[in-house]
Amino acid sequence: MIDSDFEYDRAFDRNIGWITADEQQELRRKRIAIAGMGGVGGAHLLTLTRMGVGAFNISDMDIFELANFNRQAGAAVSTIGRPKVEVMAEMARDINPQLEIESFPEGITEANIDAFLSHAELFVDGFDFFVPGIRAKVFRRCAELGIPAITAGPIGFGTCYLIFLPGGMTFEQYFRMEGLPEERQYARFLLGLAPKGLHRNYLVDPSRLNLVERRGPSSAAAVQLCAGVVGAEAVKILLRRGRIRPAPYYHQFDVHQGRFVCRRLFLGNDNPLQRLKLRAVEKQIKRLLHGR
């Protein structure tokens, strides 16, 4: 199919029914900023493109490699060595040639956060787990600019996600990471994202979690679940319909356990019970990083 054969209304007609034709046109006018085009970020981009969102700001400084094959939408033999942001922009435009995409191949830094969030009506977190500093800065700027934001993590065979809305509890108020050593930020992000810990019972080889080398086990199933929940929540936020449960509510859906949990974590990581859990997790992470 060439661009002249593309018709937006026909391409996304099967969305109608769950949303109205007018709402589809509203999504066409929306712009979403997605940081990271690897595992969850790439899946977010393709899912939201197929839902008919018309514009994106996307970022990633990395290239595709063989280790990405198990979970990343753009990873293939033909894309090894190519920039992720370039490949994913091509894939999205192959779905909708009319897309507006602003790419940030240098990644996100303090210097370009505002440009990255420019005209965005929603921020979707696709950052790597091991970059807590820049993640926190982007969420802080979203709160200052009044931009809704979602973070969804692929954990085990499930997903955990949180929503931050303008005027509500902020990312920092929930996670309480500012000024802490990076290893403690890891603990606070992981435990804050998944307080219930449904995934812990079926991690068959804990040695595969290597914080020193910044890698851990992952699954394509979990990545796709992340994209699904973010797509559904994005529709509610952008179209202003349906109940949204923002932080301090957290959500965890684990297929392996057959469970879904949505609960309000009063005070976020500053919750008294959560603080007790954090002590244990921080000690465990310290041992993994320093061997003691």
Image (cartoon, helix red, strand yellow):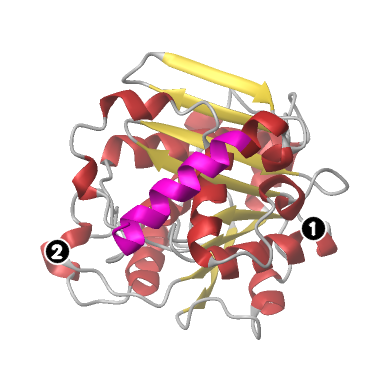
Q: Residue most toward the left?
A: 77
Q: Position of residue 97 (x, y in %)?
A: 44, 62
Residue 247 visible here: no
Per the rendered image, the range of residues in magenta is: 276-292
CB within 8 Å, label 1 to label 2: no
Which amino acid, mark 2?
A: Leu
Q: Residue most toward the front?
A: 292
Q: Position of residue 152 (x, y in %)?
A: 52, 43
Residue topped by disc 2: 66
| Residue at horizontal 31 percent and vertical 76 percent from the top | 83
Q: Quadrant of residue 250?
A: top right
Pick whichever, 223 or 174, lies toward us.
174
- Neighbour tally class for label 2: few under 14, some 14-19, many 20 plus, Cα within 10 Å: few
Q: Is residue 206 above or below residue 79?
A: above
Residue topped by disc 1: 143
Q: Position of residue 278 (x, y in %)?
A: 56, 42
Q: Is residue 3 above or below residue 25?
A: below
Question: Mark 1 or 2 closer to N-term?
Answer: 2
| Residue at horizontal 65 percent and vertical 46 percent from the top | 27
Pick whichever, 97 or 160, lies toward us.
160
- Neighbour tally class for label 1: few under 14, some 14-19, many 20 plus, Cα within 10 Å: many
Mark 1 to mark 2 CA distance (whole Å): 37 Å
Q: Is residue 288 magenta?
A: yes
Position of residue 167 in the picture relative to residue 12 (left or right):
right
Q: Secondary structure at mark 1?
A: helix
Position of residue 29 in the picture relative to residue 81 (left or right):
right
Q: Is residue 192 above or below residue 40?
A: above
Q: Quadrant of the C terminus?
A: bottom left
